[in-house]
Image: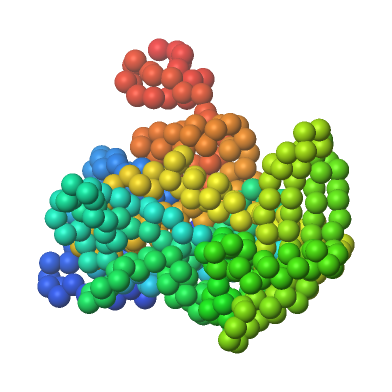
Amino acid sequence: MVATDTSFKNLFTGFSEMVNQIPDFRTLKKKIKYTVQEICASAFAMMYFQDPSLNHFQKRMKEATNQSNLGTMFKVDNIPKQKRMRTFIDKIEPQYFYPAFPDIIRRLDKAKLLDQFQFKGRYLCPIDGTQFFHTKCEGTGCKHCLTKKHRNGTVSHSHSVVVPMIVHPDQKQVLPLISEEIRNEDGKKKQDCEINASKRLIPKLKEHYPDYRLIILGDGLYAKQTLIDLITENGYDFMLVVSPDYNKGFLEEVERRREAGRIQSIEINKKGKVYCYEWSSEIAFKKTGETTDANYIGLTITDSKTGTITYKNTWVTNLELFEEDIVDLVAAARSRWKVENEGFNILKNHDYELEHNYGHGTENLAFNFFQLTLLAHLYHQAHELGDKQYQQLREKKETKKNFWDSIRAAIRNILFIKWEDLIEYLLNPPELAYDPVSKTIVPKNTMFRSS
Ligand SMILES: [Zn+2]
């Protein structure tokens, strides 16, 4: 079969190129036992298979057969000891992992798999923050921990991040583009926060995706003049939830226009509910100082029988508003929830055990492991979009848990030369039986041979 642009082997080429740029800062060259590739790829494989004990099982396979799945699929000949792996990854500056993300996105784009995510010639890109690591341990934590003092005098440490992802109202997959840690730096008294991290993130997004037109979606926290300026200066559009705290003047003007009958609206009845869409253009965003004119969109959903409001939200956007687009725009703005539901929730609660303590480290370990987990998630999303056999196996195994359990079980015992062989094997598993004569597992149909 001809390898497509998004075959595992091709995707992994990008990983190796990225790893080549990571400097080997180990000074005692004589003591170097594992290459940077072996260290990074074995950590990535752990996240890819969502298996903290992966290296242990592959090491045993290597000892027994002189080969392992880490060797065949991830180019790891010498499987590093956990401690060495963690020590090295802790020291890597997080930005070295950034290029792995645009590499995958470009490959998806080249394979035309991004087309289905297009929205009016652009991509919808919610930005949202989440905590991915938390510990109540005593002590000082690592260099970049966020800290919280409790009433009983204890201090808990945590790590959080902001992640922009490409989403689409009709697509199940979400595609993380990069991530920016919310992290404390030496000598700074005030703790870092989501907004500051987002301010660092937006120029980085532009740097790594210079030719992608994005519509930034964000919650009320983001609807601030400084952030809007940063978004537009970088050539992006925005649809942000209006915050009653920060956008008082804007909302007052909406109210004045409503009273004057100057707000446009349409109503749609759907399944016992009334959807009321509202919009109005060119409203001053800030009362005083330099101000941007922005446009207003609102949606109120009311139960047609009881008259109860079941949903209400308002957005501020720089996108031009036309009546025929309003329903789509609101659906786009509302797709922001996918970051939480299809992104963070899956990472945290279901498959990747993001909060599982892979390791904290003293410098960058927690965040670098997060980045590798996010990258593994992006690989899996790429397989879901572009790999027919992967899709078939996902369907066959019904739940994601079943799917990954069967993959983990297979790689613990069987050597595969490539990822696609593993999927093929699970799609059409040979019938096996225990042969008491040879005391081995053999194909079932060779069992009852004549003696
Ligand atoms: Zn820490």
The quadrant of the rendering that contains the C terminus is top left
Residue 382 in picture, x, y percent from top left: 58, 55
Residue 286 in picture, x, y percent from top left: 61, 78
Residue in the foreground of this view, choosing between 400 and 3: 400
Residue in the foreground of this view, choosing between 392 and 223: 223
Q: Left or right? Give the position of 197 relative to 124.
A: left
Q: Quadrant of residue 249?
A: bottom right
Q: Quadrant of residue 91?
A: bottom left
Q: Left or right? Give the position of 151 relative to 413.
A: left
User: Residue at the spot x=66%, y=71% of the render?
Assistant: 250
User: Residue at the spot x=42%, y=70% of the render?
Assistant: 197
Q: Quadrant of residue 41?
A: bottom left
User: Residue at the spot x=53%, y=50% of the render?
Assistant: 340
Q: Left or right? Give the position of 300 relative to 377.
A: right
Above or below, comparing residue 446 to residue 115 in the picture: above
Above or below, comparing residue 318 to residue 166 in the picture: below
Residue in the foreground of this view, choosing between 364 and 328: 328
Residue 138 in picture, x, y percent from top left: 15, 51
Q: Is residue 9 visible?
A: yes
Above or below, comparing residue 94 to residue 219 in the picture: below
Q: Left or right? Give the position of 271 relative to 340.
A: right
User: Residue at the spot x=35%, y=24% of the render?
Assistant: 440
